[in-house]
Amino acid sequence: MKNTNYYIKKNLNSPNKVFNFLIDTLKDSIFTWNYFVDFDKAITNVKNVEKDLEVLNSLLTVDKNNLNEEFINLLKKYPQTRKCLCILIALRYKKLSSLPIIDDINTLSASIKKDLFNPKVKINEDLSKELLKFFKLTGLRNLFINKNISNIIDYCKGIEVGMDTNARKNRTGTAMESLIENYIINLSNKYNLSYIPQATKNKIYDKWNIEIQVDKIDRRFDFAILTSNKKLFLMEVNYYSSGGSKLKATAGEYKELYNLLNSQDIPFIWITDGQGWTTAKTALKETFLHNDYLFNLYMIADGVLMEVLSQ
């Protein structure tokens, strides 16, 4: 831990006091309303297959006695429609490449079914039987027969919204990066800083002609910041709402990363937050004591980053 005027002003006169302050000011949440659903993405995904979904819409008007025959006929006439069948059961086509489906409940034998939804694979008698089995066992046939929905396109918009909630975990990292980037932008305007988001070794060299050594070829820093006096800072940011083994691993990784960068006289700033750290305080404290700069969001909002980057 490197002492700062920020800590002195807060009367945090020992590493233990600083660390306890960091833990006590961890955020319960970093989520804004736009975190929960990416509607633009959901609507775009449906638009990409809207014509094929309109074809399937016609099945809503078919008598149940003719539904199987009409279903197969539509798939033969409009092969591309097969690819969007997966969406109707909230499944991505690419997921089927590695997801065996059980064929026989007694033997539990399973096989990959991606050919069912591949427009380039011709529909023969065996494939027709498999498609009808899919149609029935997934519950889609009853959905059409019972008229539980009135429009396939609107139904799929709802499914896409539901599937998008699975992306929330990825948006957590993005949300943290966006929060920090706002502070960096403000500081850049005030102190004539330059920065690169998602900075790689090559990007740093291309923009600033600065050569750095990294621990792995695909190392990507959340931010690289160059001050007005040409001092390079590298930064990682993350947020953990809950505990797990990843927290301890991350703390250990960033301790080693600090060593590597420090040997090149490059300051490393780690900004992390979230109540998950209350379950991994020992690992976090080891890195906190070892590294120069480890802050949380409260500290950033309170001005510590401004002090570090403007010195």
Image: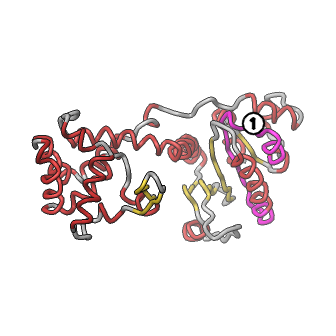
Front in this rendered view, residue 64 or 187: 64
Give above or below for 197 relative to 21: below
Picture coordinates of residue 311, whole percent (x, y):
73, 48
Does residue 60 appear left or right of residue 247 in this picture? left
**Image quarter for residue 232?**
bottom right
| Structural crowding at the residue carrying mark 1, measured as other residues with C-alpha within 10 Å and reported as few (<14), some (14–19) or many (≥20) | some
Front in this rendered view, residue 236 or 204: 236
Amino acid on which the number 1 mark rests in the picture: Thr
Q: Quadrant of the N terminus?
A: top right
Q: Residue at x 74, y 56 (%)?
A: 253
SS class, disc 1: helix
Picture coordinates of residue 169, whole percent (x, y):
53, 44
Residue 206 colored in magenta in the image: no
Tell me where the magenta segment starts and ends, as one range: 260-287
Picture coordinates of residue 91, whole percent (x, y):
38, 50
Residue at the farthest right position: 14
Q: How is the image coloured?
A: secondary structure
Does residue 278 appear left or right of residue 138 in this picture? right
**Image quarter for residue 19?**
top right
Residue 266 colored in magenta in the image: yes
Q: Residue at x 26, y 70 (%)?
A: 121
How many marks overall? 1
Q: Residue at x 72, y 38 (%)?
A: 277
Does residue 277 appear left or right of residue 94 in this picture? right
Front in this rendered view, residue 168 or 187: 168
Give above or below for 90 relative to 257: above
Q: Residue at x 75, y 36 (%)?
A: 279
The residue that mark 1 highlights is 279
Front in this rendered view, residue 93 or 51: 93
**Image quarter for residue 187?**
top right
